[in-house]
Image (spheres, rainbow, N blue to C red):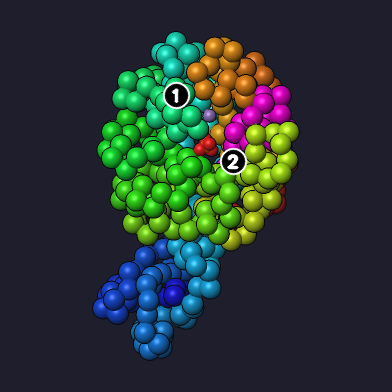
């Protein structure tokens, strides 16, 4: 249920509603909007709870949320969620490009690629230290050494960093070195991992599973939100279909569908969907045109020597061209690209896919 407070409700009224929700054995989640305050009441409730809450002073109405996901839903929070990651604004009208190598392989490659993507306008640096690989014999990342390099690069370049965490036991070490937890497609339903990152105060970037529905993706977000961590980003990275010309099929329609149902920022990953670098620009632009709040793109200075995902890595020169096109497309749909944490251009018109504050 959500308890919608009247515009004139006082802080005491809100507190009384929270206390009553807690007394009823439910979890209260406060959401302060520009125009109204709403309090989520999460959990199984008795039939009288709704009527009882409706009678409290300052309460306008009490509504049942029809979706299985509550905190992730637009019903719970109508406006787009916008938050800050080390000065980088994410969500709403802001478009952020996350770029870097698939895996952290060496200082040289990470710094070369980091400098190149920053120069081109990327605002967040990616790099995997723990790589979930289909084969147990493939390179599985440099672990702590990789995380140390990522932190060093992020600090030197002034960019927030994102890296995948694959095991709940690694949450503390990833927390220590990176700014954003990436939950990989294969771990989208690793519920213990989701709960663990949900208990931290660092943003979480959840990739859609290879065969997961949008509802399932939103339920995964709900796991993180349920622990009180509200800085959650979602990512469409391609799903399994019968089409075998590409690695996965990028479900572009997931962007507006998620935006219709949820207030959380939605990114796309053209790299893992395409599997081939020549296809990455078209998919990236399609996602941004569909209203995505950003993209995560793999870039490598020497892809033929890459230890992971070389064939889909874009070369730095081509990434520069792609960034220029992304900026133009973003503007057409009323978004703006964030450059190293600062806004480049004011949005021209209302957003096509998704509501903004
Ligand atoms: C990645 O981003 O490097 C990755 C492994 O992605 P996914 O989980 O989408 O396969
Ligand atoms: Mn990869």
Secondary structure under tag 2 reads: loop
Find residue 317 and report its horizontal and vertical position in percent.
Answer: 64, 15
In this picture, residue 124 sits left or right of residue 252? left
Q: Residue at (62%, 25%) from the top-left corner?
A: 312
Q: Nearer the viewer, residue 197 or 345?
A: 197
Is ligand 1 less than 8 Å from the beta carbon at label 2? yes
Magenta-drawn segment = 266-283
Residue 137, labelled with which disc? 1
Between circles 1 and 2, the one closer to the viewer is 1
Q: Earlier in the sequence, mark 1 or mark 2?
A: 1
Q: Is residue 24 magenta?
A: no
Which quadrant holds residue 348? top right
Q: Residues within 10 Å of mark 1 (few under 14, many from 20)?
A: few
Residue 237, labelled with which disc? 2
Q: Is residue 238 at least partly visible in the picture?
A: yes
Which quadrant holds residue 156? top left
> Looking at the image, is 266 positioned above or below residue 339?
below
> Looking at the image, is 331 positioned above or below residue 16?
above
Find residue 37 and report its horizontal and vertical position in percent.
Answer: 43, 68
Find residue 144 and report its horizontal and vertical position in percent.
Answer: 31, 25
């Amino acid at each position: 249920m959500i308890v919608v407070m009247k515009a004139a409700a006082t802080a005491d009224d809100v507190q009384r509603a929270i206390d009553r929700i807690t007394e009823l054995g439910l979890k209260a989640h406060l959401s302060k909007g520009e125009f109204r305050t709403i309090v989520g009441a999460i959990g199984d409730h008795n039939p009288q709870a709704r009527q009882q809450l409706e009678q409290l002073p300052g309460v306008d109405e009490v509504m049942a949320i029809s979706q299985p996901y509550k905190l992730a839903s637009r019903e719970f929070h109508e406006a787009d969620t916008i938050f800050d990651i080390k000065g980088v604004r994410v969500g709403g009208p802001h478009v952020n490009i996350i770029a870097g190598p698939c895996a952290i392989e060496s200082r040289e490659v990470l710094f070369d690629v980091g400098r190149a993507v920053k120069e081109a306008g990327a605002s967040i640096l990616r790099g995997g230290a723990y790589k979930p690989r289909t084969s147990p014999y493939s390179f599985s990342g440099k672990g702590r050494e990789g995380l140390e390099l990522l932190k060093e690069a992020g600090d030197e370049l002034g960019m927030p960093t994102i890296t995948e965490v694959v095991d709940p036991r690694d949450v503390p070490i990833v927390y220590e070195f990176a700014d954003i937890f990436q939950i990989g497609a294969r771990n989208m339903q690793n519920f213990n991992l989701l709960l663990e990152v949900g208990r931290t105060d660092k943003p979480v970037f959840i990739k859609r599973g290879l065969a997961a529905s949008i509802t399932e993706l939103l339920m995964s977000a709900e796991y993180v939100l349920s622990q009180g961590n509200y800085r959650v980003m979602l990512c469409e990275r391609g799903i399994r279909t019968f089409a075998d010309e590409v690695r996965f099929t990028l479900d572009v329609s997931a962007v507006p569908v998620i935006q219709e149902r949820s207030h959380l920022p939605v990114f796309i990953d053209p790299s893992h969907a395409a599997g081939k670098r020549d296809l990455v620009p078209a998919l990236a632009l399609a996602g941004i045109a569909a209203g995505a709040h950003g993209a995560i793109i793999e870039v490598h200075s020497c892809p033929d020597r890459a230890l992971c995902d070389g064939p889909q890595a874009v070369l730095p020169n081509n990434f520069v061209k792609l960034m220029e096109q992304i900026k133009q497309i973003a503007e057409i749909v009323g978004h703006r690209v964030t450059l190293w944490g600062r806004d480049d251009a004011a949005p021209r018109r209302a957003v096509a896919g998704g509501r903004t504050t």
